[in-house]
Amino acid sequence: MTPVSKPYLPDRAKLDAYIDGIYQRQWLTNNGELVQELTRRLETYLGVENLLLVANGTLALQVAYRALGLTKPIDGEPAEAISSPFSFVATASTIKWEGMKPVFADIDPQTWCLDPENVEALISSRTRALVPVHVFGNVCDVERLDNIASDHGLKVIYDAAHAFGVVHQGKTVLRWGDASTLSFHATKVFHTIEGGAVIFRDREILRRAQRIINFGFAGGNRITELGLNAKMSEFQAAMGLCVLDEMEQNLAGRESVWHVYAEELGKTHGAQRRQIDCSNNYGYYPIVLNNESQLLELVSALERIQVMPRRYFYPSLDTVESLEPKEYCPISRELARRILCLPIYAGLDLNQVKRICDIVKACLD
Ligand SMILES: *Cc1c(COP(=O)(O)O)cnc(C)c1O
């Protein structure tokens, strides 16, 4: 079977050595040695400061909203956060879960990221934040979004779950906004089994978030704010340290798969327009079909040879009832119906990639 993504499994002996250390120290969680080491190593690797490790990428978003003080209602009505309908459901469900209202602005049909003009048109007296997504690692129009936010006194939290290690104009994409969040789920480019991080611009906000992820404790028995439990464990950090050591081969493996797709399929399908001067972490290989029935045919053809592509992102979030959407985002809906992500991971047999390409080409003919 060829899944759309496979977790990267690092050298087992090295992981065992870290676990031996955990057994010796008998310290399993609560900001242990390995969590501290991974924090430092990731800050260096990513070129950021004020990084906070958390239990997953969903909590990373929730903690970011809370730490930035965005969740309080305004005159008895929920505060609004403008976000993208073309994302994983967690981007918007976390907004709602934290008592805010997700407001969906439609995406740019080329880059698949939020269109700043549509964002600006939806700003109201209750808007408190923007939550844009670097879709498939393609950096948003960060300059304009940050400018819109500062013009209107809003905070920006970038959902950077896809943008691990992505460099834009020579610098990390994670430097934009008030915070950026990462997911270290097993299927992501870098992972800690389950895990995530928030990168804050402001050190004071980081300090607050450190208390929030530990029940609001501010040292000793003092509880200074409403908190929850979003801590990363030592076992997760151990996995992260091992995966980080092998990022070069991990990314090289993904890159070689990506290039076979690009060479074989090239211009036969619709593709995302990448921002200029934005590096690729080869996290996904999305293709856009002519219509949904062609997409469904391709999915069946691939499943017949045990290849499991994924409809990602589908459905468009402005159609998900539990989010109580009020907006209509035709560009996102149309793309969501026609987009498919092909399998990509380090170690995927390149002959299998060619077989997948043959089936895609036959379907597109
Ligand atoms: C994976 C993902 C998340 C959620 O992260 P988890 O670690 O699975 O909780 C949020 N947003 C986007 C865009 C993602 O791809």
Image (cartoon, rainbow, N blue to C red):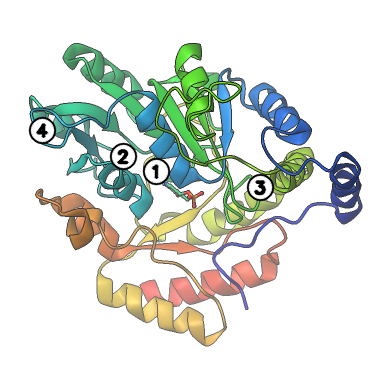
Q: Which residue is mark 1?
A: 135
Q: Is 246 on the left or on the right of 163, as rendered?
A: right
Q: Which residue is mark 2?
A: 113
Residue 83 image position (x, y, % from top left): 25, 39
- The residue where tag 3 is placed is 192
For the residues labelled 4 and 3, say whether their Cβ atoms are less than 8 Å apart.
no
In the picture of the structure, the residue carrying the numbered disc 4 is 122
Mark 2 residue crowding within 10 angstroms, few (<14) / some (14–19) / many (20+): many
Amino acid tagged 4: Leu
Calculate the distance from the C-alpha at mark 4 to the C-alpha at mark 3: 37 Å
Marks 4/2: CA–CA distance: 16 Å
Q: Is residue 346 above or below residue 275?
A: below
Q: Residue furthest front?
A: 221
Is residue 203 positioned above or below 188 on the image?
above
Where is the N terminus found, in terms of image quarters? Answer: bottom right
- Amino acid type of the residue tagged 2 in the rendering: Cys
Alpha-carbon distance for marks 1 and 3? Answer: 21 Å
Q: Nearer the viewer, residue 84 or 91?
A: 91
Q: Earlier in the sequence, mark 4 or mark 3?
A: 4
Q: Residue at x 86, y 44 (%)?
A: 18
Mark 1 closeness class: few <14, some 14–19, many ≥20 residues within 10 Å: many
Lower position in the chain sequence, tag 4 or tag 1: 4
